[in-house]
Image (tube, rainbow, N blue to C red):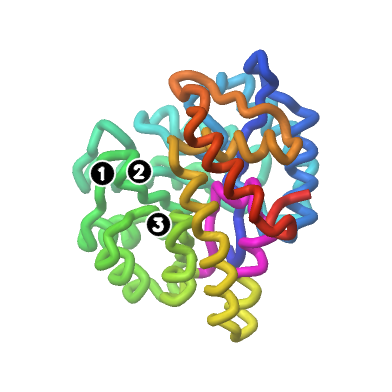
Amino acid sequence: MFNGIFTALATPFSADGNIDFNALKHLLEAQLKAGVQGIVLLGTTAETPTLSAEEKLQILNFCVPLLKGKCKIIIGTGSNATPGAIENTRIAQKFNPDAVLVVTPYYNKPNPAGLIAHYKAIAEIGSPIILYHIPGRTGLKLSDTALSNLLQAVPQIIGIKESDYDAAHVMQTAVSYNKKLDYLCGNDDLFPQYLAINATGIISAAANVLAPAFVQIYNLFKQGQPGESFALFARLYPLIKACYAETNPTCIKYLLAKRGFGSATVRLPLGEISAEHQAHLDTLLQTADPAWFIQ
C-alpha cells in the first residue's frame, strides 16, 4: 500500500517565523512534479513541536486539498501523552488520510503494557496506523518481543517507519514481517540497505530538496537495476549526509532556501545553521547535478 518515496514535509517559515504559505504551496507542487508517492504532514521535519494547534490545523486545511487524489497523505499524530495523541488523530481523521504516523511515546519510556494500551486507544479512532520507531529521539527501543506483542494486539498498525540504526533489529523486523506490513525506511543514509531487505519505500526528510533523485533511486531498483540505483545513491551520499550535519530540518531548510523555497528560518529551540555547515553545503552544491533537486 505504501510503496515508493514519501516526503516528510518541512514547514517553510518567513524570516519573521510565521508560516510561509506561498513557499509551502510551491514546495507541494514541486514534490508532486518530482513524482513522489506520498507526503507526510506534521511529522518531525515539519517542526511540529513548535507549531500551535491553530497552525497545525491551518497546514492541514491548506495542504490536504492540494494533495487529495494526487498522492497518498500521511499525517503525524503522535505524542507522549495518550489523550493528546488521541485528539491529534481525531482531528487528522477528519481529513481522511491514508494513514496516521504515530511515534512511540518519547521521554516517558512506557512499559510494554502501557505501549499496547496507548496504541489501542489511538486505533479506536479508526485510521490505519504507521508505527514510527526512532529510539535516537524517543529513548525507547522496542525489543523484538515487545514489537511482536504490540502488532498482535493492535492490528490497525499496517506499517512501520523504521529509524533504528541497529542492523540486527532492522533485519529481524524485515524478515519477521515481510509482506505482512509495509516496512518503510526512516534513515535516508541507509536507503539502499532497506531496498535490499524488501522495504516498500522510504519516508524521507532529504526528499524535501532531493525528491527527483530519491524517486530515481527507487525506480532504478524496482526496474531491476540495483547497481545503477546504488551508483546514483553513492553520488548523492555526501549531500544526504550533509543534510543531517545539524538537527533536522536545519540543513534541509538552508538547502530549500538556496533553491527558492522560503527562508532558512527554523524555530527555537533549533538555532540558525552554522557558518561552517553553510560553507560545506555550498561546496557540495557547486558540483551537484541540478537534476537531483526539486524545481
Q: Give the image quarter of residue 81.
A: top left
Q: Of callouts 3 and 2, which one flags the residue occurring earlier in the amino acid sequence?
A: 2
Question: Mark 2: which amino acid?
Answer: Thr
* Side of 108 where 214 appears, left or right: right
Count neighbours of disc 1 (C-alpha within 10 A) and say few if under 14, some if 14 to 19, many if 20 or more: some
Count neighbours of disc 2 (C-alpha within 10 A) and say few if under 14, some if 14 to 19, many if 20 or more: many
Residue 54 x %, y %: 63, 19
Looking at the image, which residue is at 65% across and 55% down?
Answer: 288
* Side of 89 where 85 appears, left or right: left
Where does label 2 land, which residue?
104
Q: Give the image quarter of residue 16.
A: top right
Looking at the image, which residue is at 56% across and 25% down?
Answer: 266
Question: Dominant secondary structure of the magenta stretch?
Answer: helix
Residue 256 x %, y %: 66, 38
Residue 96 in view (yes/no): yes
| 92, above or below 268, in the image | below
* Side of 161 where 289 appears, left or right: right
Rendered image: mark on residue 140:
1
Instruction: Check if mark 1's residue and mark 2's residue have beta carbons within 8 Å.
Output: yes
Instruction: Check if mark 3's residue and mark 1's residue have beta carbons within 8 Å.
Output: no
* Side of 44 where 73 appears, left or right: right
Spot the residue most to the top: 16
The span picked out in magenta is: 200-217
Q: Quadrant of the N terminus?
A: bottom right
Where does label 3 land, which residue?
162
Q: Is residue 124 magenta?
A: no
Q: CA distance from mark 1 to mark 2?
A: 7 Å
Looking at the image, which residue is at 74% across and 43% down?
Answer: 28
> Dot 3 lies on which element?
strand
User: Total marks drawn?
Assistant: 3
Q: CA distance from mark 3 to mark 2?
A: 11 Å
